[in-house]
Amino acid sequence: MTDDVDAFMSRLDPEMCVVTAVAGTERSGCLVGFSSQCSIHPVRYVVWISRANHTYRVASAADCLAVHLLTREQHRLAALFGGRTGDRTDKFAEVPWRAGPGGSAILEEAAAWFVGTVEERVDGGDHVGFVLRPVDWGERTRGPLLRLDDALDITPGHPA
């Protein structure tokens, strides 16, 4: 059965996004491959963050999260937030960012972004879903979005 599910999942090629979280004076961000709009009325979006990730610990205490879309040309930004851990690296020291609504951290190079208030946290096993109510958004550029197949060369930076 697991092989069948793995074969099905391997056919998917979801968009990747960078999720940033701020709680108190601590900032964190990670590359996320599991996310989706989950309600039309009212609009809700869910991002799934690994429990092993530094961002999970910060997001668990955050009131809102920022979700950033990247284009395929922004692989370097994906590699920074996906291939290095906030346990050892201040990723925000390496990119332009600004404070957004609710104290969120918005990456200025992202193709598009939104900030969402955390409405609910859902246990999904090794990942936790953060259900967000969008409160602000913006767009900088268009182009083909970075997808999972584009990021397969990025080794996760968080501890196993």
Image: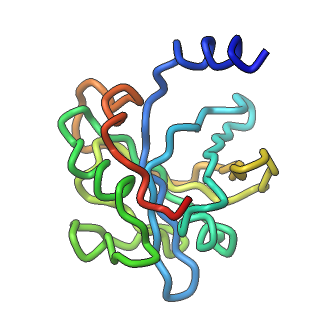
- State the residue at coordinates (59%, 49%): 134
Q: Which residue is more in the foreground, 142 or 51?
A: 51
- State the residue at coordinates (52%, 12%): 11
**Up-down: is 94 above or below 37?**
below
Horizontal side of residue 149 vs 10, given as left or right = left
**Up-down: is 153 above or below 56?**
above
Q: How many marks?
A: 0
Q: Which residue is more in the foreground, 32 or 3?
A: 3
The quadrant of the picture occupied by the C terminus is bottom right
**Up-down: is 107 above or below 153?**
below
Horizontal side of residue 73 vs 152, given as left or right = left
Q: Which residue is more in the foreground, 140 or 20?
A: 20
Give the image location of residue 3, x and y in percent: 68, 16
Give the image location of residue 119, x and y in percent: 75, 56
Tell me the quarter of the picture where residue 42 sits.
top right
- State the residue at coordinates (21%, 70%): 94
- State the residue at coordinates (67%, 37%): 43
Horizontal side of residue 140 vs 159, given as left or right = left
Residue found at the very far bottom of the displayed protein: 25
Give the image location of residue 12, x and y in percent: 52, 17
Horizontal side of residue 24 vs 129, given as left or right = left
The quadrant of the picture occupied by the N terminus is top right
Q: How is the image coloured?
A: rainbow
Tell me the quarter of the picture where residue 86 sits.
bottom left
